[in-house]
Image (tube, grey):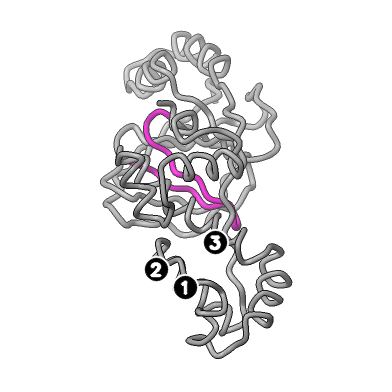
Amino acid sequence: MSTAMVLGEMDLPAGTWLPWHEHDGHQLAWAARGILSVNVGERYWVLPPTRALWIPAGVVHRTGATAQTVLRGIYAARDRCPVRWPEPTLVAVRPLLRELLEHLGAADLGDDARRRAEAVAFDLLEPVDVVPITVPMPSDERALAVARAVIADPSDRRALADFGRHAGASERTLARLFLTECRTTFGAWRVQARLRASLPLLAEGMPLTAVSRRIGYSSPSAFVAAFRRAVGVTPGAYFGG
């Protein structure tokens, strides 16, 4: 094999999820058009064309689309790849890197030109320091009913005791279940669920005021503050705005 990178392309209709899988080589998952979603275990990323996700070889993941999407998979052979990131890493796709990825997709590109372009592309992989959104699901049916209700309507502001009356469990029991089965308090879990719900909306360009209202925050400033505390950057920085 004369090159380090192999490129593949796939059209994903909105709502499509590919099965869980892994690759022998490293992958840069990128949406040339549309909005890509990636799950690794309980971790979750949403990627407009300004962002990509570096997925190390052997990491089990699934890839989906929240809108009509062109998935561009860039696969790097382990023995020819200078990038050594051990964990999935969000990457900024600035205009120069985007043009290089498009260039590398040309079928008539010669080996020498491809190697030169690959070297520059690897140099341009710029990590974005974020904490991925994590929404673990409880296994107990009562807590699971609450979790599903929150995911179905993130703007629902009911307290845990109110949810409990419909789930058939006390507030104390539900609080214990979230702590033991999800390894976090219900309040912190709900923040993560709301933030995950916000990602596709933000990627589609929905205004912050509308996003905040849709997921249950009283104001854009409260939402941005919660996003920054949990993820480490503002929504604009996450998506490259």
Give yes or no for contact between labels 1 and 2 (Cβ–Cβ under 8 Å): yes
Q: Which residue is mark 1?
A: 148
Marks 3 and 2, how far apart at CA: 12 Å
Q: Residue at x 58, y 78 (%)?
A: 143
Residue 119 versus residue 7 in the image, above or below? above
Q: Nearer the viewer, residue 46 or 150?
A: 150
Q: Position of residue 21 (x, y in %)?
A: 53, 55
Q: Which residue is mark 3?
A: 190
- Report whether residue 30 is seen: yes
At label 3, which amino acid type do we have? Answer: Arg
Q: Main secondary structure of the magenta part?
A: strand
Q: Position of residue 19 (x, y in %)?
A: 46, 59
Residue 135 versus residue 78 in the image, above or below? below
Q: Position of residue 241 (x, y in %)?
A: 40, 26
Q: Which mark is residue 152?
A: 2
User: Looking at the rendering, which quadrant does residue 9 occupy?
Assistant: top left
Residues in magenta, as a range: 35-50
Element class at badge 2 = helix
Q: Residue at x 55, y 13 (%)?
A: 119
Q: Residues within 10 Å of mark 2 (few under 14, many from 20)?
A: few
Instruction: Tell me which numbered mark, 3 or 2, is placed earlier along the sequence.
Output: 2
Q: Residues within 10 Å of mark 3 (few under 14, many from 20)?
A: some
At label 2, which amino acid type do we have? Answer: Ala
Element class at badge 1 = helix
Instruction: Tell me which numbered mark, 3 or 1, is placed earlier along the sequence.
Output: 1
Q: Residue at x 44, y 18 (%)?
A: 97
Residue 40 versus residue 163 in the image, above or below? above
Q: Is residue 144 left or right of residue 113?
A: right
Residue 196 part of the magenta segment:
no
Q: Residue at x 48, y 9 (%)?
A: 112
Q: Residue furthest front?
A: 218
Marks 3 and 1, how far apart at CA: 11 Å
